[in-house]
């Protein structure tokens, strides 16, 4: 019986350093601080890392993956580490190395004629937005973490954000990928084609796979004409049913020009204003529900403002809104967006919360919210639901903050019970328990509850086919 070869971390680190240079292989045993990479953005998940690897290019990624495959070390791909489900940090278990994509940050090509950009995975989302704008184009993915999340992470989580209504989520924006497979092979799918029917559409496997099937090293994404005019409005109403009717009416009147529709409960607005004192009250009165809307098009500001104004006035008459303000300047529009984007930060400052990232048929959302709020408060007296999100996509962040006086840690222990109440109701309405953030570690056990055995079996076969050793981001998704 040959004794199992004992794993020798020092030898492994020395091999990794010989491959990509000692400066780019961080390890705790030589005093490097890995905590920025081993703990997630929410401070909810943390795991030990043999090393943080920072390859310079796809070739070095391949060498590291081959080393890991040969020695049985798991790889955790990491972009900006802003994910919400603990998918970008190691789990407990065998040796795991974090592979940070941040040095693969080049924009390889912007092709205005083809309306595409080809970028390396470590490119920060905001950088691509800026470079596209400089070329007179728009890369439309937009979300609160855009200053630090990376294109590779956006693809691996199939990120959504605040312009899905008009441009779709990351799956709709990706035309091509370059992926390093768990065996070290490089899959070159980097085509900027809008039509290509040549066998299975392999890139789809890696979009939203949360790094469990391979490491995205580059992508070709769609660009759009840069909008000339932009108008932001903020409305107040008594019911979420009115908000849903408002969505339909505004889309009917403005069509493709209508780009964003973000719901915010009164509690969400008040929470931001309490943690960000400089935030102006967007409307005269306080309303149970609010909607932040945006329209853009290539024409003049005045024409778009008139169209938006006319549509809003008609909606006022139809009663699907009861108060509304049109941003009078870019600064005022930005202040309204800051109000929206600060909800996540305000919740973090408020002591964390039990998050939900659910999607439902838009028509079912009023019934869901109207029945869920009383049920939640009956089951968890004093709980503070902070309900907001991308209503235009049928995606709500039904986050629940702790009742006053309950410590965050104690409240987190209610997570399974709160999740069951909310996710069972979502499942009854054939909704999804994860609209945009993914599964990660956070919802892995719930996948078994809410996906059919057949779905899970096919997912396992795909995982087994591509990563038979189970070394790519273990403990996530499945
Ligand atoms: P990471 O967190 O580093 O990783 C996320 C997952 O992708 C992990 O499974 C990781 O293993 C994998 N991964 C990362 N890079 C690669 C790669 N190159 N190849 C293969 N796998 C990889 N998300 C939304 O969808 N919509 C929102 O509106 C939104 N708002 C947010 C607001 C705030 C303030 C914050 C903090 C987060 C928000 N998020 C939102 C969540 C998060 O920003 C997104 O999930 C984002 O896409 C994660 O990108 P990242 O580069 O940080 O990935
Ligand atoms: C958003 C951020 C995550 C959360 O702001 O749209 O995706 O639930 C969310 O705080
Ligand atoms: Zn969101």
Image (spheres, rainbow, N blue to C red):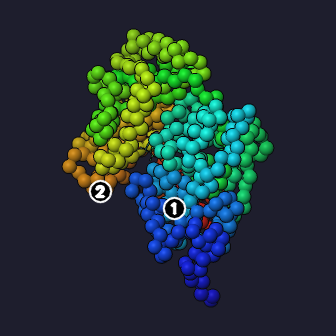
Residue lying at 46% horizontally and 63% vertically, measured from the top left: 38
Q: Earlier in the sequence, mark 2 or mark 1?
A: 2
Q: Nearer the viewer, mark 2 or mark 1?
A: 2
Q: Find residue 35 and report its image quarter.
A: bottom left
Viewed as shown, does residue 437 lie left or right of 266?
A: right
Q: Find residue 181 and report its image quarter.
A: bottom right
Q: Quadrant of the C terminus?
A: bottom right
Residue 475's label in the rendered image is 1
The residue identified by callout 2 is 409
Position of residue 105 relative to residue 16, above or below, is above
Q: Quadrant of the N terminus?
A: bottom right
Residue 397's label in the rendered image is none
Q: Which residue is nearer to you in this view: 382 or 269?
A: 269
Residue lying at 42% horizontally and 12% vertically, measured from the top left: 313
Residue 100 at x, y percent in the picture: 56, 59
Residue lying at 79% horizontally and 44% vertically, measured from the top left: 198
Residue 104 at x, y percent in the picture: 62, 55
Viewed as shown, does residue 322 lie left or right of 297?
A: left
Q: Which residue is nearer to you in this view: 386 or 222?
A: 222
Position of residue 27 relative to residue 198, above or below, is below
Dot 1 falls on a residue whose secondary structure is: loop
């Amino acid at each position: 019986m040959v004794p199992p070869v004992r794993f020798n971390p020092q030898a492994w680190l020395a091999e990794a350093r010989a491959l990509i240079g000692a400066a780019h292989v961080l390890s705790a045993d030589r005093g490097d601080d890995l905590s920025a990479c081993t703990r997630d953005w929410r401070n909810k998940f943390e795991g030990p890392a043999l090393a943080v690897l920072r390859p310079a290019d796809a070739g070095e990624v391949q060498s590291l993956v081959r080393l890991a495959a040969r020695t049985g070390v798991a790889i955790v791909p990491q972009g900006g580490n802003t994910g919400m489900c603990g998918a970008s940090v190691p789990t407990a278990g065998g040796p795991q190395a974090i592979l940070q994509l941040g040095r693969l940050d080049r924009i390889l090509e912007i092709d205005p004629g083809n309306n595409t950009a080809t970028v390396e995975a470590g490119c920060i989302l905001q950088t691509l937005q800026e470079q596209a704008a400089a070329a007179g184009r728009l890369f439309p993915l937009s979300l609160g973490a855009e200053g630090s999340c990376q294109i590779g992470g956006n693809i691996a989580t199939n990120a959504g954000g605040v312009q899905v209504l008009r441009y779709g989520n990351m799956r709709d924006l990706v035309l091509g990928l370059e992926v390093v497979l768990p065996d070290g092979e490089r899959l070159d799918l980097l085509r900027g084609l809008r039509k290509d029917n040549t066998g299975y559409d392999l890139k789809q496997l890696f979009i939203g796979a949360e790094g469990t099937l391979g490491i995205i090293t580059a992508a070709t994404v769609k660009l759009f004409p840069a909008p000339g005019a932009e108008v932001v409005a903020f409305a107040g109403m008594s019911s979420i049913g009115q908000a849903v009717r408002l969505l339909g009416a505004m889309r009917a009147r403005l069509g493709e020009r209508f780009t964003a529709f973000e719901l915010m409960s009164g509690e969400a607005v008040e929470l931001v204003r309490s943690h960000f004192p400089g935030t102006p009250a967007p409307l005269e009165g306080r309303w149970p529900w609010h909607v932040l809307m945006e329209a853009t098009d290539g024409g003049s500001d005045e024409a778009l403002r008139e169209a938006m104004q006319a549509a809003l006035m008609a909606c006022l008459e139809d009663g699907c809104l009861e108060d509304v303000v049109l941003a009078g300047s870019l600064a005022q529009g930005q202040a309204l967006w800051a109000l929206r984007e600060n909800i996540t930060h305000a919740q973090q400052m408020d002591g964390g919360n039990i998050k939900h990232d659910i999607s439902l048929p838009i028509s079912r959302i009023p019934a869901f919210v109207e029945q869920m709020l009383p049920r939640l408060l009956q089951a968890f007296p004093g709980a503070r639901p902070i309900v907001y999100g991308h209503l235009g996509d049928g995606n709500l962040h039904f986050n629940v903050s702790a009742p006053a006086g309950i410590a965050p840690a104690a409240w987190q222990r209610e997570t399974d019970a709160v999740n069951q109440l909310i996710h069972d109701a979502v499942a009854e309405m054939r909704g999804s328990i994860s609209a945009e953030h993914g599964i990660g570690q956070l919802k892995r056990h719930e996948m078994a509850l809410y996906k059919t055995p057949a779905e899970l079996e096919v997912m396992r076969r795909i995982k087994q086919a591509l990563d038979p050793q189970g070394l790519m981001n273990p403990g996530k998704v499945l």
